[in-house]
Amino acid sequence: MKKANWILKNDEIFSLDFDDFYYNIKEPLKERNGIYIDNAFSNAFNKLTILELGFGLGLNFFLSAKRAIDLGIKLHYVAIENYYQSIDDIRYFCNKFGIELNNNFISDYPPCKDGIYRIEFDGVVLDLVFQDVNIALKDLDFLADVVYADGFSPNKNKEMFSKETLKYVKKLLKLTGKLVSYSSNSDFKKSLIELGFEIHDINLGIKRESTLAILKHKDLQDDIEGYFHKNYLEVNNIAIIGGGIAGATIAYELSKLGKTISVFEQSHTLANEGSGNKIGLLTALIQNPSSLLGEFSQFSFWHSSKFYKKLGYNLEGILEHAYTDELRERFKLQKDNPLIKLHFDFAYLKDGGTLEPCKLVPKIFAKSNTRIILNYKLNSFREFYDRVELDFDNKTMIFDAVIFASGAYSKEIFSNLPLSVVRGQATWLKNKIKYKHPISSKAYITGAKDGIILLGATYDRNLIAEASREYDDININNFKEIFKADFSDLVIGNRVGYRSYSSDRFPIVGAYFNEEKYKNLYKSLQFDKHKPQVNSPRSRIFINTAHGSRGLSSAITSARLIASYFNNTPSGMFKRYEHALHPARFLIRDLKKGLVKD
């Protein structure tokens, strides 16, 4: 990502990248309010989704956020920007215009790195998309009520106002949605008309007219990836199966939407299996920058770190260790990554550190308005067009939708998905080890909590076995092999937990699918992978599982994806991540390879 270059010209902010001022220098606030904010909020009710092309100084966002807060409207604001402004620059701009910066905006403002970053405060959600506009527009999947086209003048930024860009903007705008821009460029308006917009001129008396365009015609075309289409459910009564970190974060996100939530946990306590460990580590995979799995891991890591810090946790940082030649080469490729600081064979991630999952999960549940039912094991379920029925012992309950956050038990429920159960044994050590930061290597060692340090963890696929000293010795020897330290005399206990993994190592998150319907709808994929496909059928069943050993990292972003289905709002992640997580991805791959038989 590029850093923005600007100077003060006659005490006004001037872009050297576009040879233009960032705003109308005569009456900037009158222009912004009159063109953008007034038109966006006219007829707005309860909630509003705005897409902005060009975040710039953030002026449109801050004014929109203030208007939304004043009116009691829930605002979801997605802003695309390819030229980075530092938080100090943002502070300077806000001070110049008399705008008070929210503390959450300051603490959560992202680094100079391509990606998508969420900031929340006072009922406002901002998704900052740091990416070239045409790349970003193709990789987002939501519908906006309003689009702000605000990327300097068309003469200075032709790509932003091109017809090709506007085609992708149209796909992300609701029918009868508004596009507003200070520009009244004739080619720009001509393109809008050709794309099905109705043009209205805005005249504030500051300059020649600006543009308000209403989308009057929207093409209903099949998508090449229609099998991943998101069908939104405007429902209220939702069940969650599972009381671990995945279930807790979903309950938290849905509670912010005012949903009625019931959580069913088959055990007598919350936080079992992997979520029940005394201590765990928040860290990220460090892979080749071109790796989608590594990219998703770092995306989730950044967001989860911000989330846990908001809950009051202090993260001390973590050292990832490259203990093989392959890992060393991967680490070298991350030398320009602002999330990572390399030092010899180590990568320091300042936003990671030690957490206590067994205490964290109940804390997150406590922050959600959720009914929790323990000792309730699900026996079966049935989906109908208007409800889902859940069968427990001697009782059937009805919900509008159900979300399975069932961890290691997901394999029993969804036998058609390529899931495996992995046994992990963690070893508890006396707090007599003095490392400044936790270390993740062939084995990992955590910081101390309640006088205990955790050494872990074994990895045994599809093994069911009680905890034993034999597996503690595996953890001890794995650490000793790399760092020559022997902790045999410090062992004071252990614990076994079972985790769920998918065959491609991504979590499985999204709307579940009827396999026979999918086979019938998309059987043509084996002959033509590039043919547009009909949109997937609507589902009332959702899955959030297979987080493996990285659930502390991936749970919160996955929960936001699930919540977006129930609120018709942006998920906060790129479309390529959504598709990589989708439960139907395995079947679609097999269909494309011709591996599915009638």
Image (tube, rainbow, N blue to C red):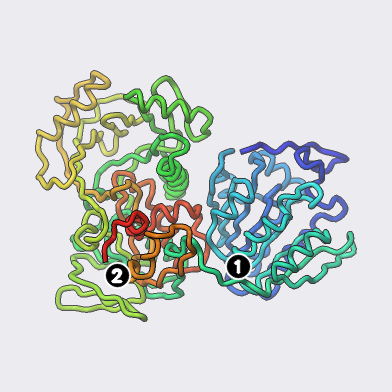
Residue that sits furthest to the front in the current view: 527
User: What residue is shown at x 24% (from left), y 26% (from top)?
Assistant: 479
Measuring from the top left, give residue 530's x and y in whole percent: 48, 58
Closer to viewer: mark 1 or mark 2:
2
The spot of residue 356 in percent (x, y) is 31, 44
Q: Secondary structure at mark 1?
A: strand
Residue 74: assigned label: none
Residue under numbered circle 1: 48
Q: Residue furthest bottom?
A: 386
Q: Which residue occupies 46% across, 45% down? A: 299
Q: Residue 516 bears which disc, if any?
A: 2
Q: Position of residue 223 (x, y in %)?
A: 51, 64
The type of residue carrying mark 1 is Leu
Q: How far separated are the C-alphas under marks 1 and 2?
A: 38 Å
Q: Is residue 426 left or right of residue 172?
A: left
The one nearer the camera, 110 or 581, is: 581
Task: Say which residue appears at 15% left-offset and 33% top-offset.
Answer: 472
Residue 284 or residue 162, whichever sits in front: 162
Category of crowding for the residue at label 1, using alpha-carbon neighbours closer than 10 angstroms: few (below 14), some (14–19), many (at least 20) = some
Q: Judging from the image, what secondary structure is the residue with disc 2 in?
A: helix
Q: Quadrant of residue 529?
A: bottom left
User: Which quarter of the rendered picture does the N terminus lie within?
Assistant: top right
- Give the percent coordinates (x, y) of residue 119: 55, 52
Residue density around tag 2, few if under 14, some if 14–19, many if 20 or more, within 10 Å: few
The answer to whether the residue labelled 1 contacts the one labelled 2, judged by CB atoms less than 8 Å apart, is no
Front one among 262 and 128: 128
Q: Quadrant of the C terminus?
A: bottom left
Horizontal side of residue 457 vs 220, given as left or right: left
In percent of the image, x 54 and y 45: which residue is there? 115
Above or below 312: residue 527: below
Which badge, 1 or 2, comes first in the chain's sequence? 1
**Total numbered labels:** 2
